[in-house]
C-alpha cells in the first residue's frame, strides 16, 4: 500500500494506473475506521481495480473547537486495517496541504438550501466544510468513483448535487448503513457513549422502524408521526435534535409520495447520533 502525504506523491501512482486503463475508486474518511468504513472499502474493491482511501480530520466541518480536539485519531490501527483490506493507496494530507492559505482564507463550496436543513440547521457551516474538502479531494485524487455511507444521508444528497452542479467527473456511490446487532448505526462517535448509554442508543433505530411500519400501513400525518417517534426516543433518555420525514432528495413529503427517508439526530451524553431509514410503500 502506497502512503502519500501530498497530491503530487499520490498522482505519480494514480497516473500509472490510469495509463493502464484501471478504474480508481475513492473512499474519503476522517479515520478512526470501523466496519462501516470497511464496507465502503469492500464495495470499492468490487467496483474498481484500484482503491484509494484518504484520512483527514477536516477542521472546516467542525462547529466546535472542543469537538475537533477530541475527535479520535487512530492512524496506526487504521493503516493496519487498510493494508489488510488490500487498499492500494492511503492519502494522508495535513491541514497545510489542504488549506495552504489557512482556514479563514480558504474558498468555500456552498450547496444552497440542502446545507441549511436538518443537520445544517443545528451545525451552521458544517456542510460548507464537507463540500469544500470533498471537492478538493476529488481534484487531488481524480477518482472515477467515490463511495459514501448512506448513514449520512444528507451529506450524500449534498455531495451528489455538488458533483452535478459543478460538472465533476466522479460517479457517487451510496453504500447501505452498517449496524450493530441491536440496530445502532456504526459511527466513530459511538465511542463517546459510556456503558449505561450504549444500550439506550438503539432507541433511534427502533423508532425509525416503527415509523416505517406506520408509513407502510398508510399513515400520512408526517408531523404527527415524527412527534410520536421523537417522544419514543426521548423516553429512552435521549434528547432529540430533529426527526423529519422527507423525500429521498430531502424535498418536503406530500401525501401522494410512496418513497421517503425518515431522518433523526439525537444527543445522548456527549454523543450526537444521526440515523435514517429509507421507506418504500
Image (cartoon, rainbow, N blue to C red):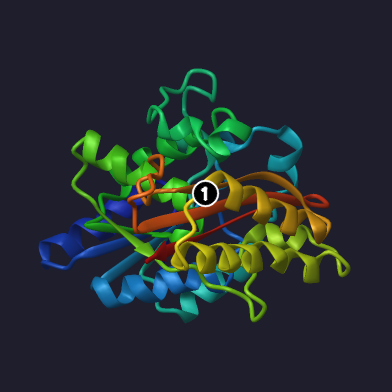
Locate residue 59: give its quadrant. top right
Q: Position of residue 73 (x, y in %)?
A: 67, 56
Q: Residue at x 31, y 50 (%)?
A: 141
In this rendered view, identify the residue nearer to me: 277 or 220. Answer: 220
Q: Residue at x 46, y 46 (%)?
A: 154
Q: How many marks?
A: 1
Locate residue 274: give its quadrant. bottom right
In this rendered view, identify the residue nearer to me: 4 or 212. Answer: 212
Q: Residues within 10 Å of mark 1 (few under 14, many from 20)?
A: few
Left or right position of 117 against 257: right
Quadrant in the picture for the C terminus:
bottom left
In this rendered view, identify the residue nearer to me: 266 or 246. Answer: 246
Please indicate, yes or no, whether residue 123 appears anywhere in the rendered image: no
Where 242 sits versus 39, above or below?
Answer: above
Determine which residue is flagged by label 1.
Answer: 221
Quadrant in the picture for the N terminus:
bottom left
Q: Position of residue 66 (x, y in %)?
A: 76, 38
Left or right position of 238 against 226: right
Q: Residue at x 54, y 75 (%)?
A: 81
Where 122 sits versus 171, above or below?
Answer: above
Where 220 sits versus 111, above or below?
Answer: below
Q: Residue at x 48, y 46 (%)?
A: 93
Farthest residue in the right direction? 196
In this rendered view, identify the residue nearer to me: 90 or 219. Answer: 219
Q: Position of residue 277 (x, y in %)?
A: 50, 62
Please indicate, yes or no, whether residue 248 appears anywhere in the rendered image: yes
Q: Position of residue 272 (x, y in %)?
A: 70, 49
Local secondary structure at mark 1: loop
Locate residue 161: give its quadrant. top left
Amino acid at each position: 500500500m502506497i502512503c502519500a502525504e501530498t497530491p503530487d506523491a499520490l498522482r505519480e501512482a494514480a497516473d500509472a494506473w490510469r495509463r493502464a486503463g484501471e478504474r480508481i475508486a475513492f473512499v474519503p474518511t476522517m479515520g478512526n475506521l470501523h466496519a462501516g468504513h470497511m464496507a465502503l472499502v469492500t464495495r470499492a474493491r468490487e467496483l474498481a481495480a484500484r482503491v484509494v482511501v484518504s484520512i483527514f480530520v477536516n477542521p472546516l466541518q467542525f462547529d466546535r473547537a472542543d469537538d475537533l480536539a477530541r475527535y479520535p485519531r487512530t492512524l496506526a490501527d487504521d493503516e493496519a486495517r487498510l493494508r489488510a483490506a488490500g487498499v492500494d493507496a492511503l492519502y494522508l494530507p495535513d491541514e497545510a496541504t489542504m488549506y495552504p492559505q489557512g482556514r479563514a482564507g480558504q474558498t468555500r463550496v456552498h450547496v444552497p438550501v440542502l446545507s441549511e436543513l436538518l443537520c445544517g440547521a443545528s451545525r451552521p457551516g458544517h456542510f460548507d466544510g464537507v463540500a469544500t474538502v470533498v471537492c478538493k479531494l476529488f481534484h487531488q485524487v481524480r477518482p472515477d468513483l467515490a463511495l459514501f455511507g448512506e448513514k449520512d444521508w444528507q451529506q450524500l444528497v449534498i455531495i451528489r448535487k455538488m458533483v452535478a452542479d459543478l460538472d465533476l467527473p466522479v460517479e457517487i456511490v451510496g453504500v447501505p448503513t452498517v449496524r450493530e446487532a441491536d440496530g445502532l448505526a456504526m459511527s466513530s462517535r459511538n465511542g463517546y457513549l459510556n456503558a449505561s448509554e450504549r444500550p439506550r442508543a438503539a432507541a433511534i433505530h427502533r423508532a425509525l422502524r416503527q415509523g416505517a411500519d406506520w408509513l407502510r400501513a398508510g399513515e400520512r400525518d408526517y408531523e404527527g408521526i415524527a412527534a410520536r417517534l421523537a417522544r419514543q426516543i426521548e423516553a429512552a433518555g435521549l434528547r432529540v435534535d430533529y426527526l423529519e420525514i422527507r423525500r429521498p432528495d430531502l424535498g418536503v413529503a406530500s401525501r401522494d409520495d410512496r418513497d421517503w427517508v425518515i431522518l433523526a439526530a439525537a444527543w445522548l451524553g456527549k454523543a450526537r447520533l444521526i440515523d435514517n431509514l429509507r421507506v418504500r410503500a
